[in-house]
Amino acid sequence: MAGPALSAARTRPGLAVTLDDFDIADGPRLSGAERHAAILSSLERHRIRAAGFPAGKFVDNDPARRHLQTWSQRGHLIGNHSYSHSFYAGGSPERMMADILREEPLLSAFPTFRKWFRYPYLAEGKTAEGRDGLRRLLQANGYRNA
Ligand SMILES: [Zn+2]
């Protein structure tokens, strides 16, 4: 029978930290590199391993690739958030899947890449048909809904 400490550990709430988009452009207070370093520093200070879901259009450039490389080297996971980050209303699961697969080559070389998909705006489609159609395509391409 488990002691109190083990029981407490089993019932302790969990917390998943995820970051979407990775639009790490220069801002008025911090450069993109400074902001990214601050995010990583904060995660490490609190011993948090996070998952990032970059939109391809924001990471299809060299500075962003370096940010992702650092992100991955520090042990943080990387998932797919589609290339164009468009709202999925459910009209064309095939077009949405193509957008997801368009981003994959930008991410798949990183060791911490996982075939996890985060829907932009968490929009899974306005119809059951559209929702189920993309779910089938995600599964057929080895993706899980993140
Ligand atoms: Zn997003």
Image (tube, helix red, strand yellow):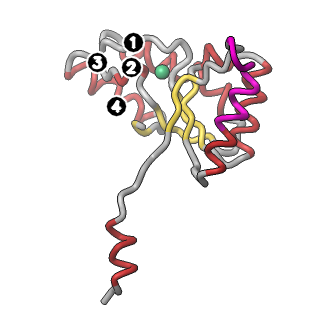
Q: Which amino acid does label 1 sit on?
A: Phe
- Please report the residue visible at 44 percent of the width from the left and 12 percent of the height from the top: 95
Q: What residue type is labelled 2?
A: Tyr
Q: Tell me the magenta residue range.
A: 28-39
Label 3 crowd (10 A; few <14 / some 14-19 / many >=20): many
Q: Which residue was labeled with disc 1?
A: 87
- Please report the residue visible at 42 percent of the width from the left and 39 percent of the height from the top: 144
Of the two numbered discs 2 and 4 in the rendering, the one whose residue sits closer to the viewer: 2
Q: Which residue was labeled with disc 3?
A: 125
Numbered circle sitting on residue 135: none
Q: Is mark 2 within 8 Å of ligand 1?
A: yes
- State how far apart marks 2 and 3 are (Cα): 11 Å
Q: Is residue 34 magenta?
A: yes
Label 2 vs 1, first from the N-terminus: 1
Q: Is mark 1 within 8 Å of ligand 1?
A: no
Label 1 crowd (10 A; few <14 / some 14-19 / many >=20): some
Is there CB contact under 8 Å for labels 2 and 1?
yes
Q: Which residue was labeled with disc 2?
A: 121
Of the two numbered discs 4 and 3 in the rendering, the one whose residue sits closer to the viewer: 3
- State how far apart marks 4 and 3 are (Cα): 13 Å
Residue 123, picture quadrant: top left
Residue 109, picture quadrant: top right
Q: Which residue was labeled with disc 4?
A: 136
Query: Tag 4, which secondary structure?
Result: helix
Q: Does the residue labelled 4 lie within 8 Å of ligand 1?
A: no
Is there CB contact under 8 Å for labels 2 and 4?
no
Query: Tag 3, which secondary structure?
Result: loop
- State how far apart marks 2 and 4 are (Cα): 20 Å
